[in-house]
């Protein structure tokens, strides 16, 4: 039976930098945008605010929907729906004291670093395009292949 997980994430951008969270799972390390799973009965913005606070220590103001991405495990047993929002503003001190043991770091990443560091889901070109356009692009949907890191 396939399980569907809804994951909400936020793009915090400052010039050519974006905020990334470093995860370690099953010995593999990879970066992703801050965010996480939506709990039953929780709205997408509420989940995103909670997850970003837990992972980064920042309180945020959620902006517009940037897009969605679906990732399917090759055998069809897992289906992850990523919903991505722009974060309009944030406050607080960046902290690496996450309650999630998979989170081992958080940092501002330059767009150029996207080419050399593992990043999931595979939306690097979209992130570059959005940031370079000043977030003037329409919302999008992309099927992102499952990537083993």
Image (spheres, rainbow, N blue to C red):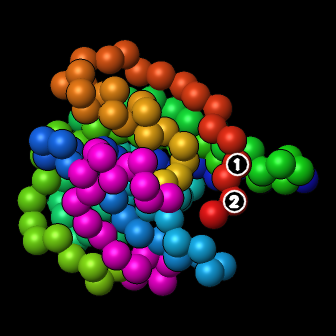
Q: What is the x, y in percent for residue 101?
A: 48, 83
Q: Is residue 74 left or right of residue 84?
A: right
Q: Is residue 109 visible?
A: yes
Mark 2 = which residue? 148
The circle on residue 70 is none
- Quadrant occupied by the C terminus: bottom right
Q: Horizontal and vertical percent for residue 20? A: 33, 59
Q: Is residue 109 left or right of residue 123?
A: left
Q: Nearer the viewer, residue 80 or 127?
A: 127
Viewer-proximal residue among 14 and 82: 14
Residue at 27% over, 56% down: 109
Seen at 36% across and 36% down, the residue is 127
Which residue is drawn at the image coordinates 48% and 54% (left, top)?
119
Compared to 52, does 103 lie above or below?
Answer: below
Kindly identify which residue carries mark 1: 146
Task: Classify mark 1: helix, strand or loop.
Answer: loop
Q: In the rendered structure, are the residues bearing label 1 and label 2 in contact, judged by CB atoms less than 8 Å apart?
A: yes
Q: Residue at x 19, y 64 (%)?
A: 58
């Amino acid at each position: 039976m396939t399980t569907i997980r809804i994951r909400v994430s936020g793009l915090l951008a400052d010039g050519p930098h974006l905020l990334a969270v470093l995860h370690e799972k099953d010995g593999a390390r990879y970066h992703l945008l801050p965010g996480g799973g939506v709990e039953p009965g929780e709205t997408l913005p509420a989940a995103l605010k909670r997850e970003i606070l837990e992972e980064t220590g920042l309180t945020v103001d959620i902006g517009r929907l940037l897009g969605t991405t679906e990732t399917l495990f090759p055998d069809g047993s897992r289906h992850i729906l990523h919903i991505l929002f722009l974060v309009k503003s944030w406050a607080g001190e960046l902290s690496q004291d996450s309650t999630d043991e998979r989170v081992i770091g958080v940092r501002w990443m330059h767009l150029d670093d996207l080419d050399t560091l593992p990043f999931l889901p595979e939306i690097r070109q979209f992130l570059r395009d959005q940031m370079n356009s000043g977030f003037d692009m329409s919302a999008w949907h992309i099927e992102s292949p499952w990537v083993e890191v």
